[in-house]
Amino acid sequence: MKYLVMIYGNQADYESMNGKAGPGHPAWTQAELGAMFQYMETLNKELIESGEMVDGQGLSEPRQAVVITSGADGAPVVSDGPFGETKEVLAGYWVLDCADTERVTEIAKRVHACPVPEGAPRSDVVIRPIMEAPTGA
């Protein structure tokens, strides 16, 4: 079964990883950032070797987002960020092909355990099964 494993963040998380501290978001050092990248690289390599990794990517900061909404006349309206009303956004994802929910939950717990600086918030990790189109449709 395929699963989408998502990790969330906000603009303050991205800024703190770029060395800019904010309330509840201490600035990351280069060593802390390196430890996070090393941890994720190791996890990703293991998932590739096990054959469970289908895809996985980190996403750019929210201020680089583009959003398409409907205008008053229903026509598409293009807006760019940042969006003050957005509390959390998708920061990265993995598409995994796992034997069962127990296995993907084990992996998601490892994602959640990624090292962060002392006092930094730990991002939520969400697992969603990927629906497959019925065969013969």
Image: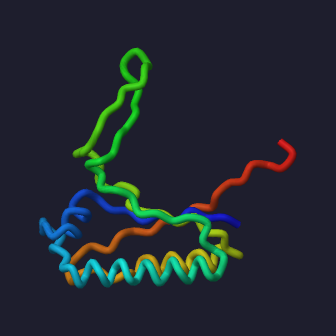
Relative vertical location of residue 134 with respect to residue 8 in this rendering, above or below = above
Q: Is residue 13 left or right of residue 73?
A: left
Q: Residue at x 20, y 63 (%)?
A: 15
Q: Residue at x 26, y 49 (%)?
A: 63
> Quick one: 96 or 30, which is closer to the camera?
30
Relative vertical location of residue 21 with respect to residue 131 in this rendering, above or below = below
Residue 93: % across, % down? 48, 63
Instruction: Describe the colour scheme in one phrase.
Output: rainbow
Relative vertical location of residue 46 with respect to residue 57 in this rendering, above or below = below
Picture quadrant of residue 103: bottom right
Residue 94: % across, % down? 52, 66
Q: Quadrant of the N terminus?
A: bottom right
Quick one: which residue is furthest to the right in this view?
Answer: 136
> Quick one: 119 or 66, which is closer to the camera?
66
Picture quadrant of residue 98: bottom right
Q: Is residue 133 left or right of residue 115?
A: right
Residue 49: % across, % down? 62, 82
Quick one: which residue is furthest to the top in this view?
Answer: 73
Q: Residue at x 64, y 74 (%)?
A: 52
Q: Is residue 119 left or right of residue 37?
A: left
Residue 14: % across, % down? 25, 63
Q: Residue at x 25, y 65 (%)?
A: 13
Picture quadrant of residue 123: bottom left
Q: Quadrant of the C terminus?
A: top right
> What is the count of numbered marks?
0
